[in-house]
Amino acid sequence: MIQAIDRAARVLSSLQGARHLGITELAGILDLPPSTVHGIVKSLQQHGLVAKEPGGQRYMLGPALLKLSNVYLDTLDVRARAMRWTRELARRTGLSTRLGAELFDEVIIIHHNRRPDGSQQMLETGITIPVHASALGKVLLAYHPTAADELLARELRSLTGDTITDAAALRLQLAQVVERALAVEVDEAVLGESSVAVPVADRSGAVIAAVSVVMPSSEWPPEAGVLNDLRETARNISRELGCATWPPAVRPRDDD
Amino acid sequence: MIQAIDRAARVLSSLQGARHLGITELAGILDLPPSTVHGIVKSLQQHGLVAKEPGGQRYMLGPALLKLSNVYLDTLDVRARAMRWTRELARRTGLSTRLGAELFDEVIIIHHNRRPDGSQQMLETGITIPVHASALGKVLLAYHPTAADELLARELRSLTGDTITDAAALRLQLAQVVERALAVEVDEAVLGESSVAVPVADRSGAVIAAVSVVMPSSEWPPEAGVLNDLRETARNISRELGCATWPPAVRPRDDD
DNA sequence: AACGGTTCTCGATAATGTCGAATATGCTCC
DNA sequence: GGAGCATATTCGACATTATCGAGAACCGTT
């Protein structure tokens, strides 16, 4: 791990948390001398990864990230394939759908279909949710035991009163997830919101993403038809990616 | 400029262009030994900025970029303020609107409102357009002479037959842009598409973004009402940002 | 099963980033 | 409007740190 790059990434990460930071503040967070931080920030700035906030003398994330991220989304084969299937899923179920991938101890939403009732809803692509508090996350963890082990070794943060924070309880759920190829979550991330997720696998049979439908907890549990549509969607996407058999198999423990 | 960070940024940039690259390919592009590139890529990977493509042994951009970019958009004050005004602008004019900011020699779209006729249109947030081939870009250049000087010193790439590639011609247009506080573009970026843009300034009076309406070239020129609505929109956004007078003044040459 | 082309590991070298002190800049309070 | 303070920024000597070549391991292919 190259030190300078590690530090640069930490700078981006800090700015991700705090939005606007001065050199001194950053130096405080990273526990480095201000002059060192200044050099890093200036290097990032030259590439547009960081920008000076208009007016002030603090720094913020830069516009180059938006361009990179846009290309990232375009690069994702799963996403391109999944889009038409999830749109259809949203139409059939009348619910909003998400496609999520693992990002350390979070799930990042790489595609979002709004529920088709025409109500005003924010676009969720790009937001992240702790893995342990989402159906998407439970699916990804269940099929990636190494990540699960790592996560369960740490303290689990509670988001609502119903977030599962007990390692043993979560591990039990993960086992069930694999059995049913389906994970659920009720009020665990956001009060009043619940979801069901299923795995998406690629040619190699590895689970690389998960699809979910989100519904108001008042409509819980979902009808059997919804679950079937959801499973069918995941199977179709996986098939398009060249996956031979669905549901997929759990990836071996040390495979990374 | 820290070498390691510069190289890391170049790696990201290369992956932005090529989508998928192996270590050797990257090494070729950057003209570095493969082992050096490997170290850089591995460091980026640890932070999720780069990821191994599923299946293959090549690398691609990573999911962390999506999260960073999402925060970047949230951080942008202009964008938050502009959104309601551009939505209204789209409604009144029946056209799609864009909010753009400068990213080196390109304009990056930081917000996009689809035209409200209900037709299927792709979301343009995050795409980039060469500054010299867009109305948005001409506005940004006109108010940022240092950037204009730099750009005009180089060769201008042609996107359509109508792209302005002559430095003198462009410089003349930029002068007019400041006079009218308005830039136009007809078929210069995409055939059949034309746009008009106006500047958005912040508290300090500096132009930090531009708003535009985009229309089919068949509807060109826009009615006077559209131009008024556009100007009004930019003035409203600028006022919300604490800008005292609109149209804004050109930023002095060496001010960066 | 053997080959060619990869990615990846390791360690010595010297190039490189680091960090303290000094300077410049900009904000705040009087 | 001016003085004072806090912050950003520059600079250069030093030693930590990244670099790069050689070789091992790996993968896909013939």
Image (tube, coloured by chain):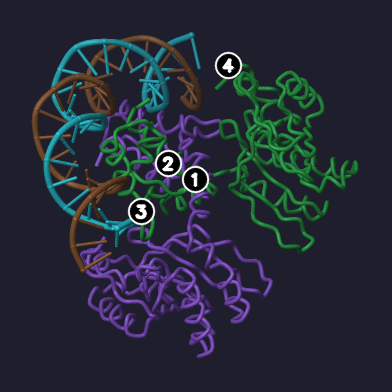
Chain colours: A green, B purple, C cyan, D brown
For mark 4, what is the residue?
A254
Return the x and y of residue A5 as percentages of the image width and height. 35, 33
For mark 2, what is the residue?
A12
Callouts 4 and 3 in the same chain: yes
- Compared with B66, A254 (above or below) is above
For marks 2 and 3, the one nearer the N-term is 2
For mark 3, what is the residue?
A52
For mark 1, what is the residue?
B68
Chain of the residue that carries numbered disc 4 in the rendered image: A
Chain of the residue that carries numbered disc 1 in the rendered image: B
Disc 3 to disc 1, C-alpha distance: 16 Å
Return the x and y of residue B256 as percentages of the image width and height. 26, 60
- What's the amino acid at mark 1? Leu
> Viewer-nearest of labels 4 and 1?
1
Q: Contact (CB < 8 A) between labels 2 and 3?
A: no
Q: Of helix, strand and loop, which one carries label 2?
A: helix
- Compared with A211, B161 (above or below) is below
